[in-house]
Amino acid sequence: MKEKVAEFLDKNFSHFIYSKQEVKSNIPSFFIKPEGIVPVVKALKEEPSLKFDFLNDLTCVDWLGKREPRFEMNYLLKSPSNGHARIMLKVPLDDGESVPSIIGVYKGANWPEREVFDLFGIYFEGHPRMERLIMPDNFQGHPLRKDYPLEGFGQDYLIYDLLQIHQEDKEA
Amino acid sequence: MAVMYEKTASKMRGKFENLPEGHLLVNLGPSHPATHGILQNIIQLDGERIVDAETIIGYVHRCFEKLGERYDYNQFLVCTDRMNYVSTPLNNIGWILAVEHLMGIEVPARVTYVRMIISELSRIMDHIICQGILGVDLGAFSGMLHMFHHRENIYTIIEKLTGARLTTTFCRVGGMERDIYPEFQKEVKEFIKGFKPALEEFVTLLVRNKIFNERTTGIGGISAEDALAYGFTGPNLRAAGVPHDVRKDTPYMFYDKVDFDVPIGEDGSVLHRTLVRIEEMRQSVRIIEQLIDGIPEGPYHANLPHAFLPDKHRVYNNMEELIYHFKIIMHGVKVPPGEYYFATEAANGELGFFIVSEGEKSPWRVHVRRPCFWYYQSFPELIKGGLIADSIATMSSLNVIAGELDC
């Protein structure tokens, strides 16, 4: 499967892939440029001989101090018609860089992308609702970043916000 | 939590600001008898019809993925206990298998046999809860009480085996914490003997009930395409007619050596999810029956002095074991650098662990692919246009576990 996908990507999307970096992983990995993720994912889904039509997982890794650029989006795709083969697409991103949302290709990317936005602070362009999913709306920072302090920023601002809301309710 | 609730509520007031005349906003949760866990749904109603719905999660978020970056590989096992707390051993086994595959450890056949038996017992336990509670939500209380006796029997077995009922922390990297107790096989057989007829009685009690049938037929259905697009796995996907099962597709442990069928439904409705889960319980019993007499003799852990804690009496009397004990406790299990994704079939679907290791005591990053998280995002779409009473049945039959959802 790995050779087939590599050949397919080389043939059609050579301008979108980084041609380096071998990852020690049990799943074949391919490095994609941020602007290419949507067309690549779409083509992998629609190509009849590959048919990666199941989005298995979507997450992010923060490589602070280990690798440049800092973030790495991971898209795990599964092809049920090809013996449930899996491939991993990796999109390296710098801090503050955004990546196009793949929600147009896989509906199920909705919550996982919001989760990554919430916990890593990566913005997904074209997502209909880029808001926090798990943490409260007034939460500061993104907890899964490696530079987020383990004890957090304290809860004073949360209590202050609560008092503010009560005040507004009283006035209204 | 109060802070978050206030904040979320204020946000929701803005979202549903221009309600049409006669429409009503109803808040279900986060602490509501019908949500089974801390989940919040805000539902816009026209009479009893649901016009729009909004799902808010995150009330039991403990950020296990962050904790995983500090804990060592055996310590993170404790976090997996608290994910799907209805079938804890399945999470434990999923995590331990992921670590063992990453390290390239082969465990003795005895361990794998016991792990498989416990897996299937946990699956039965999970499905009993799901189906029992579904009945309760629809007004059929006796089914749940009838089955809880048998669930209790499984809990007794697991308690004797691991020392805990809910937070089992079953297995360790390289084997099990201790060997099975002498009456284990006998008790599992006794459980099966009682459970088989009870399951058929449960089917008669619940599924052949006219009211249950009318309340569940065609309710909360989802098409196979939509289910796949949303990332459904497990019984909920199979109820929509897609025969995907990690145990068959990419077999792990000895699932390729046992006989079992993968039941599928047609329209993904509440009734079909129920039928699929009931058939899965029968298949689980079938798997256990094939394994229970064949548990081979042998050690209960692999011979891995650098990864598996030695026996206590040897630690006290033997220099070498004392050193290994110290090394494992202080430095943890050493795992080679690399990335690993490993998926197992948990009771709700594909439970995947993605580990990024830098060769240190703790993983650089742990990510858990929780089945609930993927399929619960379709919930507003599933209940739109239906009755509010049906939304309760839909939620119960999806089997959303808050601990797994938020992780």
Image (tube, rainbow, N blue to C red):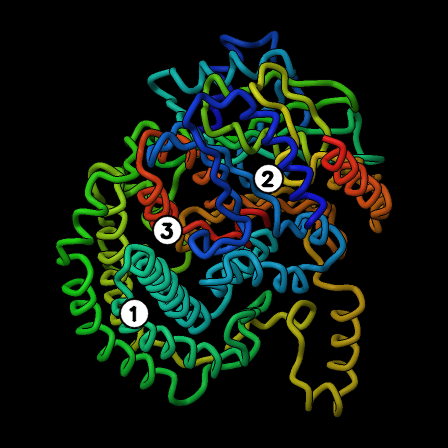
List the residue tagged with mark 1.
B288
Q: Can residue B228 be seen in this view?
A: no
Q: Which amino acid does label 3 sit on?
A: Ser
Side of B206 where B396 appears, left or right: right
Which badge, 1 or 3, is on the more N-terminal residue? 1
Q: State the SS at label 2.
A: loop
List the residue tagged with mark 3.
B396
Q: Is residue B20 visible?
A: yes
How crowded is the residue under tag 2: few (<14 C-alpha within 10 Å), some, or many (20+)? some
List the residue tagged with mark 2.
A25
Q: x%, y% of residue B139?
A: 28, 59
Side of A51 where A146 appears, left or right: right
Q: Which residue is drawn at 27% across and 38% down?
A: B240
Badge 1 and badge 2 both on one subunit:
no
Q: How far apart are marks 2 and 3 (CA)?
A: 38 Å
Q: What residue type is labelled 2?
A: Ser
Q: x%, y% of residue A95?
A: 79, 24
Q: Give the chain of mark 1.
A: B
Q: Distance between the residues labelled 1 and 3?
A: 27 Å
Closest to the camera, between mark 1 and mark 3, is 3
